[in-house]
């Protein structure tokens, strides 16, 4: 009887210690994202987003923040071509906010309430094109949001990987939106 009891305890511990999901590492290859070519002599990046250290903001906990990822995308994928005009890209927001969310599922007539974490990534930037006399020729605002939820009981490693995937997918969304909005509002200055 003692052996059976220890066997059951051992099996329970073995099953409870196993991870349910395997989270893949995210590789940021900027060549996979959309490339944009503008008729401009120079491209200037202004990062006006200041990282907040409040509890709900979690972008400061990442090794490479979402704003740094956006700046790297601009440096690698936005090209200026020509001898006049200046493109100014102002990053207004590149934050990730963490909130607790209650979810309810009904299983066999019993409502089970559980806590989940919701991570919301917001990118907001302005693309402004000026002539050589600093007259505004055209501008557009680009905003994208992406959210993901997770169980509250996750390790720091899993949280980091979830945030990296969120930033990757969010940057992918932003680049597609940037292409669309640039073609619509800066169409005569884009190749």
Image (spheres, helix red, strand yellow):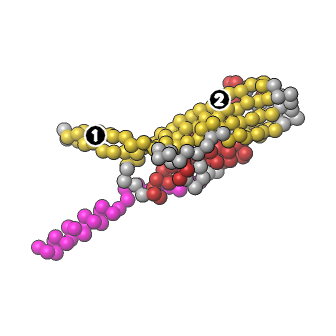
Provide the residue span drawn in magenta: 1-27
Q: Which mark is residue 105?
A: 1
Q: Secondary structure at mark 2?
A: strand
In which quadrant of the rendered image does the C terminus lie? top right
User: Where on the picture, by quarter, is residue 27?
Assistant: bottom right
Where residue 132 appears, as percent x and y from the top left, is 86, 30
Disc 2 or 1, which lies upstream in sequence? Answer: 1
Tell me which corner region of the image, top left, top right, bottom left or bottom right, holds residue 42. Answer: top right
* Residue under the image location 77 percent in, 34 percent down: 87
Are there few (<14), some (14-19), or many (20+) residues within 10 Å of tag 1? few
Q: Position of residue 94 (x, y in %)?
A: 59, 41
Q: Is residue 167 magenta?
A: no
Q: Is residue 42 left or right of residue 22?
A: right
The residue shown at (27%, 42%) is 113
Q: The N terminus appears in which quarter of the rendering?
A: bottom left
The disc at residue 150 is: none
Image-based side of 110 in relation to 41, left or right:
left
Residue shown at 40% from the left, 45% from the top: 117
Disc 2 to disc 1, C-alpha distance: 39 Å
Q: Nearer the viewer, mark 2 or mark 1?
A: 2
Q: Residue 170 location, x and y as percent?
A: 56, 41
Q: In terms of secondary structure, where does tag 1 sit?
A: strand
The residue where tag 2 is placed is 141
Most extreme residue toward the front, as rendered? 54
User: Crowding at label 2, few (<14), some or many (≥20) Cα neighbours within 10 Å?
Assistant: some
Q: Is residue 26 left or right of residue 129?
A: left
Going 30% across and 61% down the picture, which residue do you hit? 16
Q: Is residue 78 above or below residue 16?
A: above
Q: Is residue 11 magenta?
A: yes
Q: Nearer the viewer, residue 145 or 169?
A: 145
């Amino acid at each position: 009887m003692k052996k059976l009891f220890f066997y059951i305890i051992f099996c329970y511990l073995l099953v409870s210690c196993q991870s349910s999901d395997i989270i893949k590492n995210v590789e940021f290859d900027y060549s996979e994202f959309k490339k944009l070519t503008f008729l401009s002599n120079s491209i200037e990046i202004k990062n006006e987003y200041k990282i907040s250290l409040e509890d709900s903001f979690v972008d400061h906990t990442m090794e490479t923040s979402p704003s740094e990822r956006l700046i790297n995308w601009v440096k690698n994928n936005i090209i200026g071509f020509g001898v006049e005009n200046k493109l100014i890209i102002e990053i207004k927001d590149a934050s990730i906010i963490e909130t607790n969310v209650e979810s309810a599922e009904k299983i066999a007539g019993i409502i089970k309430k559980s806590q989940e974490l919701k991570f919301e990534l917001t990118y907001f930037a302005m693309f402004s094109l000026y002539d050589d006399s600093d007259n505004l020729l055209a501008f557009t605002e680009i905003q994208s949001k992406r959210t993901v939820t997770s169980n509250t009981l996750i390790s720091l490693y899993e949280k980091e990987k979830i945030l990296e995937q969120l930033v990757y997918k969010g940057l992918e969304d932003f680049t597609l939106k940037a292409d669309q909005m640039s073609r619509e509002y800066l169409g005569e200055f884009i190749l």
